[in-house]
Image: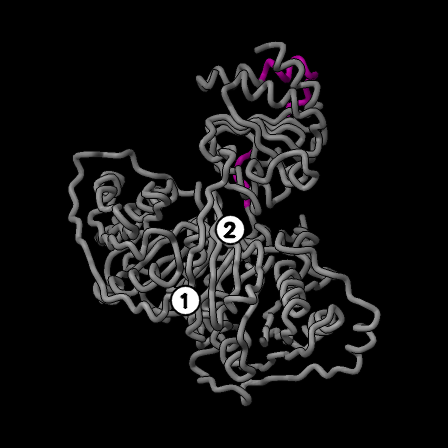
Amino acid sequence: MKIIVCIKQVPNTTEIKIDPVTNTLKRDGVPSIINPDDKTAIEAALTLKEKTGATVTVITMGPAQAEKALREALAMGADEAFLLTDRAFAGSDTLATSTIIAAAIKKLGADVVFCGRQAIDGDTAQVGPQIAEHLGIPQITYAAAIDYCNECGALIVKREFEDRYQTLKVAGPCLITILSTLAKPRYMNVWDIVAQDEKEIRIITFADLDLNKEDIGLGGSPTKVKSTATKQFDKTIETLELDPESAAKAIVDALKERHLI
Amino acid sequence: MAKNIWVFCEQRDGEIQNVALELLGVAHELAEKTNEKVNAVLLGHNVKDKAQMLIAHGADGVYVVDDENLEKFVTEPYAQAITHIAKKYEPNVILFGATSIGRDLAPRLSARLKTGLTADCTKLEMDEEGNLFMTRPAFGGNLFATIICPDSRPQMSTVRPGVMKKLEADASRAGEVVVEALEWDTSKFAVTVLEEVKAEKAEANIEDAKILVSCGRGVKNLESAQELASKLHGTVSASRTLVDAGLVDHARQVGQTGKTVRPEAYLAFGISGAIQHLAGMEESEFIVAVNTDKNAPIFKVANLGIVADAEAVFKNLNKLL
């Protein structure tokens, strides 16, 4: 079995702050990390590798510095890594991105594709299902557990919903998007850190893929960002400094006034 | 030409989900701008009788696909059903709830219909030409982006539950119910449901509470919060800090990675108000904030802000009520 794991390098958004003067994002010095759900997807693939002898290929799309994320995946135990990078890919929305990644997966060949459920910078959760549709394979999203059934040669997946879960069986090629709660990602191990140094990160560009220019990049993206804005608050109120007793009274009065008590 | 605004009306075990009614509400508003119709899309098995309820909440018409292949949610049959009717009637817009079902189905469909999709919108607007302006939070709620899909139809969006307002049900509203059937491509049904298990404990539904007593880092003793909540016939909710610390269940978390709430009163105790938290509660009708730090950002959205110790105010409130 060959597993391809799609990962994304993201800024650690929990460390992003707003500049109070300019009201813009302060991204300087914000470290890049492997998107948390994706890191668990790597872990899930490595676990399956240990169980079944599968191979694990990690791919990412991004600028040259995304290599760092691939190096980390190799050091966790992935077998090989590919960086999809090309000026023509820049500005892609989720649909165009999924078109590119699906073309790369087609070229590399995979039995199973793992993605994280969603990336913390965009939170869309769209690229995984869109890749699956381009590849014409079934998808299972929100996976909380994955097991391989030897007798039936199928994957058994626990799929989470807000109020329930399903146990699903899928035979044949499929794409699974993985929740970070599925497993705790392993640390990079010393041997693999040394070994990954020897490994080459292979580059895939537009020229390597069966793609039309009009389906990718900014021009191939059906959605466009019209405008962005930082958060504005229009409520201005007086903040009162009160002792606890008067504070309690002020709250009760306000709730009474609104007929809430 | 692509026309009309469709709402995918999610049902679970035959029960229409709240978000579907909220989407009918916003679709109704958008449709007035362009004189389009609002169409509900209802998929499931033995669900046809729910169509009237969707009309009462603002649908001008309902497309129903009622089939045993749609009994439980599985992506492929649901995608085939919507693709079938979308190709037949060519909607201008399709809206989905940003639930674990909507966020699975909508991207699959966007790739199948070769059109754009915007995730997790918190605001939708329409111009006279029928172009949809979809606003969503990005970078953990630090930034808002307005997205358009100028050249492809349908324009698709998932919308956060709890953000849009549903219309009052009006049983006198009339609408047409159209039942559709299709030839299934069962060769694509590769996923089998072995079992479906509903969560045992009824999770606290903070989205439906009238009054929320919400606690953050400044609250150590949740018992007094619980006492206050029961006195006010409200519910306890929390900021991410307390959830991450394991003191409060995730189902009670308000904010970007939790739930969006708009209760009649949101009482924030010891919550500093990180932007991710504010994104989940700022639409509340009336906001009270109690915090020892007078510069806490929560005060920017509060209608009544009090600089005081949360625990001490709890004590006095519980004494007073």
Q: Which mark is residue A160?
A: 2
Question: Could you say whether the residue bearing mark 1 is in a helix, strand or loop?
Answer: loop
Q: Residue at x 63, y 74 (%)?
A: A54
Q: Residues within 10 Å of mark 1 (few under 14, many from 20)?
A: some
| Residue drawn at 44 percent across, 71 percent down | A137
- Compared to residue B213, the image places residue B315 above or below, namely above
- Image height of A64 relative to B11, above or below: below
| Quadrant position of residue B219 | top right
Q: Let me know if residue B121 appears in the view.
A: no
- Residue A166 falls left or right of residue A80: left
The tally of labels here is 2
Q: At label 1, which amino acid type do we have?
A: Ala
Q: Residue at x 54, y 77 (%)?
A: A110
Counting from the top left corner in percent of width and height, residue A9 is at 65, 67
Q: How far is mark 1 from mark 2, CA to CA?
A: 19 Å
> Is residue B3 or residue A115 the one in the foreground?
A115
Q: Dot 1 falls on which chain? A: B
The residue labelled by disc 1 is B190
Q: Secondary structure at mark 2?
A: strand
> What residue lies at 56% left-to-right and 67% top-to-bottom?
A150
Q: Is residue B293 above or below residue A205?
A: above
**Residue sticking out furthest to the bottom:** A207
Asked if one can make out residue A246 in the rendered structure from this viewpoint, the answer is: yes
Circle 2 chain: A
Pick the residue in front: B138 or A234: B138
User: Is residue B49 shown in magenta?
Assistant: no
| Image quadrant containing the N terminus of chain A | bottom right
Please give the range of residues in magenta.
A232-250
Rendering coords of residue B170 (x, y %): 22, 34
Q: Which of the 4 quarters of the picture holds residue B118?
A: bottom left
Task: List x then y, in percent, for residue B148.
Answer: 41, 62
